[in-house]
Image: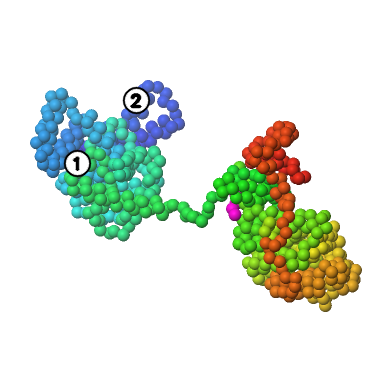
Amino acid sequence: MSDHLGSSHDEGELSDESHRRSNRASSSEEPKSGGSNKVLESKMRESILSRLTKRKMSESDDDTTEQRFSIQPKDQQKAKEDRYREKEREKKRERDDRKGGREGDVRQKDRDIRGRHERTGRDVKGHEHRHHHHRKHDGDGHRNNRSDSDRFSERDRKRDDRHRDRHRRTSSPEDERVHRSPTKKPKQGEIAEDTKLFDRVLEPGHKKKEKEVLVVEDVEMSPVEILEEKEVTEIVEFTIDSPVGPKKYSKFESDPENDVIEVLEENAHSDEDVESDEDKYTKTPDDSEWEEMTENEQRLHRDAMKKRREIRQKELIAQLPTYFPGLMGCRNIDEYECVNRVDEGTFGVVYRGKDKRTDEIVALKRLKMEREKEGFPITALREINMLLKAGNHPNIVNVKEILVGSNMDKIYMAMEFVEHDMKSLLDTMSRRNKRFSIGEQKTLMRQLLSGIEHMHKLWILHRDLKTSNLLMSHTGILKIADFGLAREYGDPLRKFTSIVVTLWYRSPELLLGTRLYSTPVDMWSVGCIMAEFILLKPLFPGRGELEQIKKIFMELGTPTESIWPGVSELDGWKTLTFEKYPYNQLRKKFLAGRLLNDTGFKLLNGLLTLDPKNRFTATQALDHEWFEEEPYPVPPEEFPTFPAKSEQNKAPPPGAKPKQPENRMAHVDPETAKLLKQFDVRPEQMKPGGFSIKFDPTRF
Ligand SMILES: Nc1ncnc2c1ncn2[C@@H]1O[C@H](COP(=O)(O)OP(=O)(O)OP(=O)(O)O)[C@@H](O)[C@H]1O
């Protein structure tokens, strides 16, 4: 052997040189003829032999350690194969010994096989080749050793020791890190390399390492070479256990559990310096190994698998996203039937709807979304938010739910339906030359102030109080609606826009451009509304901001620093010059006390105070003596009832024949007709009482 190696070594040096030359030739020059090909072939052969020799010299004198090249002397190859067969038989006998009862059969089988081969003159190469292939693919040898150290033959141990020494000499520190099991100490009779296959699987950098695998040019696969080759780093296939049995993953397949397994294995062993008996069984055996195991080993494996499954379960649970149980889904608008359209304001269309489940009548306000390009409009969000916050009061309209339409740009707010809006009511009364009694005025004012006091206590500014945003039920209950401009305010005040509140109800400080304002802006509006309750028409119907402020100063007098400290600091005051109007002409508007007595006027004056700091708060107004004197506020239920405009387009009584329904439908465009049908609105409901139900399919 050493002779052979020595000569090979010499040859190898020469071969190396010729190999280099042949490489240059093959890379830069095309072979000119068949003769040169032969020369190249022989040079390559020499080169290979030289590499083989070098390797053998540097690594070991054991012929079984260098097995990757099949170009070997035939007798040497034969000798190896014989040794391999013998060793296999030995192992088989050991296994059979353990199995006891099966010993005789196996030996007989072994004899049979040997006899058969002798008879046929064939060696067991085919079989061994398959076996080698199998081993290469699943790291069988490693697992056999790991699962039962007794299976090591004396020879195996010696060889592994040699191999370990060699590996230590040749491998880089990084390789050592990769090959050494970070969590296990090798047991006596068990070598560290035994764990390396799975260590590589579990090693976070193993995939990277795979790329560094030495490519072995096997011209002819030898069964011996792979058995002995402990340095094979290419993991072609590995297994993970599952409750239904081992599962195989090719390295080329995506392994969904791979990452988890890595973590689990690390976790499972990180705090264990000493390998416990159980650890040996955490690696899943393949089918044949499983069959070879004793019952006890199988039980230990099952326990270990169970433990691993539990850890894996915990890991997976820890990866689940946070669940937010507070969010409820919205019902669809289909759950309601549209009875009729009530009105359209600046921010939305309001419909009268009926809950199909409960028959409850509600107001469905469709929030305007179409101008919103990015996400849910902030105005709609504010309105929902503020109403949900403040709506739990008898004088604030109550929101029942939020509904979605056919898509996300159709959002509806279902509110309690309130039959009248104050503006329409006042118009009707004015037309009919009717007025609220003083008791009724007091009732209305007390309800309004009560709702506002509640709102302000919640730090909410309405910022759009006006008669059209006040609703009145058949039972005389006033409700504040339309929180589309409502905002939460704080202390200290934040700057808000001054372009809020419908002009006629806008306070002088807003008109003069202040951005630091608070509840007094609402109280000014309340003063305007109180006057409108009495007069049945707006108090300051300006046609523009300038006219609006002028009208106010004409009635209440142009303020000075002594009347309103700080007025001269306001932007509007600085830029405009106002005519000096004499102090407070308002009383004249109320027919010198016939429409409002002195006490009532004091309240009105307190609300319409120019200086916001001196303006009445809702609580001050509620405590005003006007409410304490006669005539007292009337109970709401004694309020007169009025025909509600929003209900005027009722369906005729059941059984009544619709007048020319076909003709009416004929004038409706197909889309509107479809909607009418969908929302159960009969054609005769379309134009009653001067009301026109105009469905806009693009909006609803
Ligand atoms: N809960 C309700 N019950 C009955 N009718 C209602 C209800 N809410 C609103 N309405 C009617 O719809 C009209 C418009 O409603 P709302 O004021 O909320 O909409 P808007 O678009 O904010 O209008 P604007 O800002 O122009 O006043 C009201 O004037 C009232 O007639």
Residue 486 figure quarter? bottom right
Image-based side of 119 in relation to 184, left or right: left
Q: Is mark 1 on a helix, strand or loop?
A: helix
Q: Is mark 1 within 8 Å of ligand 1?
A: no
Viewer-nearest residue: 344 or 97: 344
The answer to whether one can see residue 210 in this image is yes
Which of the labelled discs sits on residue 38, or is there none?
2
Residue displayed at 72% across by 68% down: 633
Lower position in the chain sequence, tag 1 or tag 2: 2
Viewer-nearest residue: 194 or 28: 194
| Magenta region, residue range | 400-404
Viewer-nearest residue: 71 or 671: 671
Which of the labelled discs sits on residue 292, or is there none?
1
**Residue 57 percent across, percent down from the top left:** 25, 43
Residue type of the residue flagged with mark 1:
Glu
Q: Which of the image's four quarters has the N terminus?
A: top left
Asked if residue 422 is positioned above or below residue 145 in the image, the reply reads below
Q: What element carries label 2?
A: helix
Residue displayed at 56% across by 49% down: 358
Residue type of the residue flagged with mark 2:
Lys
